[in-house]
Image (tube, rainbow, N blue to C red):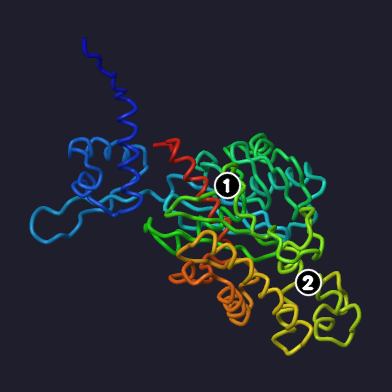
């Protein structure tokens, strides 16, 4: 006797609802007939589900559309206030936080110095208080907050959000996600900072194009990277891929916080640039570098070195030039292995004028294989200083969407 698989009608109905809501999110304002065509569902099904979404305030009607002849159809779009998502970028120098509404429009942004993240427990408690205070400033009930995505530099265990190791923070084996889950009244999701940044930059660069391979490089206090294939992050077998900053570019070079020597991060990151400049400032009190930091090397930052270089300080120019050369070498290795369509350079170091970018380009092109670099496009990121926070918002929403946990 032939056997039949039992159909789970509730699961099908839930999936249909997700597909219709997603269609409105991506393509709204849109009418019911267009939704039916896009989702390949019947018009009665679309009418029933849009009615339910209207009752739940997930979507709203914005009146009739003007399409010329015939009766004007009712148009729908997502209700911006249906939910909010928070994105938290834990940088080594600054904490940056945004809150987005359901249309992914930024409703709030905030930043403050990171300070010293020790002891870890005290820092996590402080972070919890910051998040809860910002939620209170929204003038909206906490029930509307879906949750928070947290972007953290270092190796992150994808399944648990545990910080395996973060050289920038000096953390090792810290259960960051579970601790935040205990402190906050909504879910938290911890992801690697570079992965989050890449998700945002790829979305800004490609839109809905799923045919591109993008290699996104974060050049800031540290150096990291991530590979995006279409709209999907490739994070490696254990979710820790993209550690470009800890590839060795100078054998026997400076010690790196990861335990190796000669890593790209140890010779070309913002921290490395400031450290090298501090030696000049300490021995040459009349240098432009020393002048910019007030002859207090503890206050020296990478941006001051770029400013000194622009003013003609030879020591500063040499430091910047060497860093760009090393980054070019690191990029050429990645390009030769991965053969991406584009390389996107992001982070604080890229906010220092065109000289650094062009020097990196020259260093990369000198070493890249002709076939790998034939169609390569090198660009500067578009996301700005809150790009990582935006990216971890995307990661959180992607997680909720894939598990169909949105409150529709």
Q: Name the residue at 46% across, 57% down.
A: 105
Visible residue check, residue 136: no
Of 342 and 153, the residue lying toward us: 342
Residue that mark 1 sits on: 149
Residue that extends furthest to the bottom in the rendered view of this protein:
312
Left or right position of 393 against 255: left
Q: Classify 388 as above or below 142.
A: below
Tell me which numbered mark, 1 or 2, is placed earlier along the sequence: 1
Q: Classify 118 as above or below 408.
A: below
Left or right position of 401 against 384: left
Visible residue check, residue 330: yes
Q: Quadrant of the N terminus?
A: top left
Residue that mark 2 sits on: 274
Residue 353: image x %, image y %? 61, 80
Q: How crowded is mark 2: few (under 14 residues within 10 Å), some or many (20 or more)?
A: many
Q: Name the residue at 38% across, 55% down.
A: 210
Residue 109: image x %, image y %? 58, 59
Q: Which mark is residue 407?
A: none
Quarter location, residue 36 = top left
């Amino acid at each position: 006797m032939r056997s039949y698989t039992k159909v789970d009608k509730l699961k099908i109905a839930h999936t249909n609802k997700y597909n219709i809501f997603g269609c409105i999110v991506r393509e709204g304002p849109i009418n019911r007939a267009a939704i039916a065509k896009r989702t390949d569902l019947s018009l009665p099904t679309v009418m029933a589900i849009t009615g339910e979404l209207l009752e739940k305030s997930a979507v709203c009607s914005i009146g009739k559309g003007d399409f010329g002849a015939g009766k004007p159809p009712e148009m729908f779009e997502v209700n911006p206030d249906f939910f909010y998502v928070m994105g938290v970028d834990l940088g080594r120098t600054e904490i940056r936080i945004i809150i987005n509404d359901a249309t992914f429009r930024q409703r709030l942004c905030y930043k403050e110095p990171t300070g010293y993240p020790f002891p870890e427990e005290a820092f996590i408690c402080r972070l919890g208080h910051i998040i809860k205070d910002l939620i209170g400033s929204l003038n909206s009930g906490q029930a509307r907050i879906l949750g928070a995505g947290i972007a953290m530099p270092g190796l992150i265990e994808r399944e648990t959000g545990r910080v395996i190791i973060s050289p920038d923070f000096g953390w090792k084996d810290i259960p960051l996600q579970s601790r935040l889950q205990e402190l906050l009244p909504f879910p938290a999701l911890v992801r690697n900072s570079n992965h989050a940044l890449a998700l945002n930059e790829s979305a800004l660069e490609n839109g809905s194009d799923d045919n591109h391979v993008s290699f996104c490089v974060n050049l800031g206090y540290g150096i990291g990277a991530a590979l995006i294939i279409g709209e999907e992050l490739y994070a490696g077998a254990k979710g820790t891929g993209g550690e470009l900053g800890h590839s060795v570019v100078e054998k026997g070079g400076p010690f790196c916080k990861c335990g190796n020597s000669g890593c790209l991060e140890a010779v070309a990151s913002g921290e490395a640039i400031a450290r090298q400049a501090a030696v000049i400032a300490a021995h040459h009190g009349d240098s432009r570098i020393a002048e910019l930091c007030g002859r207090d090397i503890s206050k020296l930052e990478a941006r001051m070195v770029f400013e000194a270089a622009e003013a003609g300080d030879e020591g500063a120019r040499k430091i910047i030039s060497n860093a760009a050369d090393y980054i070019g070498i690191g990029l050429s290795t990645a390009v030769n292995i991965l053969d991406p369509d584009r390389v996107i350079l992001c982070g604080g170091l890229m906010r220092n004028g065109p000289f650094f970018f062009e020097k990196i380009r020259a260093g990369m092109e000198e070493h890249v294989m002709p076939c790998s670099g034939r169609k390569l496009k090198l660009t500067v990121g578009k996301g700005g200083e809150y790009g990582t926070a935006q990216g971890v918002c995307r990661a959180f929403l992607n997680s909720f969407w894939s598990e169909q946990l949105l409150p529709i």
